[in-house]
Amino acid sequence: MKTVIAHRGACGYLPEHTLPAYAMAHAMGVDYLEPDLVMTRDGVLLILHDINLAATTDVAEKFPQRRHADNIWYPADFDLAEIRQLCARERLPGRFRRDSQGFHIPTFEALLQLLTELNRLTGRRVGIYPETKHPVFHRERGLAMEEPLLAMLADFGYSRRDDPACIQSFDPDNLAYMRHTLGSELPLIQLLDQMPDNAGLDRIAGYANGIGPDKRLIEDAQRQPVNNNALVREAHERALLVHPYTFRADQLTPGDTDLEAELRRFYFDYGVDGLFCDHPDIACRIAHAHTGTAT
Ligand code: G3P
Ligand code: CA
């Protein structure tokens, strides 16, 4: 069974991390919705990629005086009531026009409500796949993310190992804390932007259920003259899932000419279990063609 994770929603078509982008992804037949998470000053989990609001909102126009000396507007300086005044904007050029109105930054709770209702009304069981962004930054400001995240997931019925909720992070301490200190049973995925050695994979297998490598790491491992495909194979030998990021029709791996070919190679030649995709309709076409949906 191959998994499709809608990266930031169907963000190839609608502004990233907005409820319309998540609703569209759900309708496309994905297996998981992926939000990045940060926290507001008043302790609300927000769906946002950056700890700088300027990247994907009109905060510079609405709150010019709140910019820090480092040119950053930190979400952790804003209350939810202030966040609600902002318009969300797509990040990447060539995608949804940036001067559009009507898109907002959702709370994590709003996304879980949307997902719950769409699942109920469609009879599907699409899962949730949140990423904790900058957990140390938040903890240092008294805004630790781990407890509120697990509590929110539990409120919506996600707490056991077979519930369709994976938590991902680049920060190993953050994941190990949720596994060993808070006792979470939920699947945990260690994101990777550097090639791990086998000892590193052993450590990851001690607290996580999978890895989420940059797709270039898998390509690099694949090109090795001996021991190729080592990353996927070594992970699988440790019972770790492999979910690489990020697959985009408008940012292909050099040498690829279309997303379908790139996806087929990763799913079926390299044997990854799932992947994060900005154009999830295309990934569903490839991943679910013979197997049906994963949930
Ligand atoms: O979470 C997988 C992938 O999204 C990690 O990179 O920067 O897109 O959150 P980023
Ligand atoms: Ca992410």
Image (cartoon, rainbow, N blue to C red):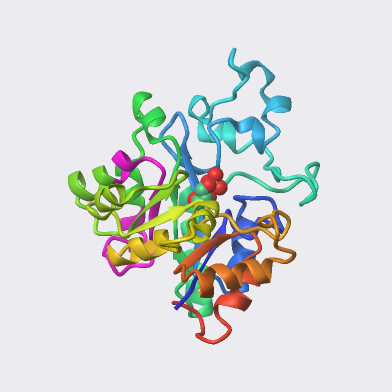
Residue at x 29%, y 54% (from the top left corner):
208
Q: Is residue 3 left or right of residue 160?
A: right
Q: Is residue 20 depicted above or below 268 in this figure?
A: above
Name the spot of residue 22 as percent of width and height, x first: 59, 60
Question: Is residue 33 in the magenta section?
Answer: no
Magenta region, residue range: 153-175
Single out the residue that lies furthest toward the top.
69
Q: Viewer-proximal residue, 88 or 203?
A: 203
Q: Is residue 152 left or right of residue 107?
A: left
Q: Is residue 224 left or right of residue 247?
A: left
In which quadrant is the N terminus drawn? Answer: bottom left
Name the spot of residue 165 as percent of width and height, x first: 38, 62
Name the spot of residue 210 as percent of width and height, x first: 35, 59
Q: Could you say which quadrant of the image residue 170 lies in? A: top left
Residue at x 43%, y 35% (from the top left corner):
134
Residue at x 58%, y 55% (from the top left corner):
246
Residue at x 63%, y 77% (from the top left corner):
285
Q: Is residue 27 visible?
A: no
